[in-house]
Image (spheres, rainbow, N blue to C red):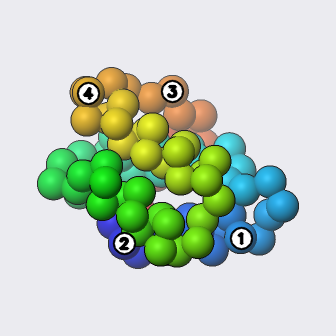
Amino acid sequence: MIRILKSLAQWAAGYDSGLKWNEEDKLKADMMNRPERWTSVTVEQVRGKCRELKMRPNDIETIVGFLERRKQSRRFNVRSTYRDFRF
């Protein structure tokens, strides 16, 4: 999970506007395709790690929002290009 957040932070740092839709889709796909990876992780842990990685507040809230939704057993609409993506 830390490796994934580091990758997202690096990608987002390369843009003026933060995470792009395709990076968000990659994360959503991984959360759905590898639920065991995200089960034991808390929202607070993810938020703290994102802050530590100096991510933008909007990106942090996006990532945390995805995790919260997934923990509620909600599914995501992921574009077909990334539907089977796993980090």
- Looking at the picture, does residue 78 appear above or below residue 41? above
Q: State left or right for residue 14 relative to residue 11.
A: right
**Residue behind mark 2:** 2
* First of labels 3, 2 by sequence position: 2
**Residue behind mark 4:** 72
Does residue 4 appear in the picture of this structure?
no
Q: Of 16 and 44, which appears nearest the observer?
A: 44
Amino acid on which disc 2 is placed: Ile
Q: Secondary structure at mark 3?
A: loop
**Label 3 to label 2, Cα distance in Å?**
24 Å
Amino acid on which disc 4 is placed: Gln
**Label 3 to label 4, Cα distance in Å?**
15 Å
| Residue at the spot 23% in from the left edge and 56% down from the top edge | 41
Specify the quadrant that holds the C terminus: bottom left
Q: Is label 3 in contact with label 4 (beta carbons under 8 Å)?
A: no
| Residue at the spot 33% in from the left edge and 66% down from the top edge | 1
**Residue behind mark 3:** 77
**Label 4 to label 2, Cα distance in Å?**
22 Å
| Residue at the spot 41% in from the left edge and 75% down from the top edge | 3
**Label 1 to label 3, Cα distance in Å?**
25 Å
- Looking at the picture, does residue 25 appear above or below residue 2? above
Q: Position of residue 57 (x, y in %)?
A: 61, 53
Does residue 27 appear in the picture of this structure?
yes
Amino acid on which disc 1 is placed: Ala
Q: Position of residue 24 (x, y in %)?
A: 58, 47
**Label 4 to label 1, Cα distance in Å?**
29 Å
Q: Secondary structure at mark 1?
A: helix
- Looking at the picture, does residue 83 appear above or below residue 74? below
Q: Residues within 10 Å of mark 1 (few under 14, many from 20)?
A: some
Q: Of 58 and 85, which appears nearest the observer?
A: 58
* First of labels 4, 1 by sequence position: 1
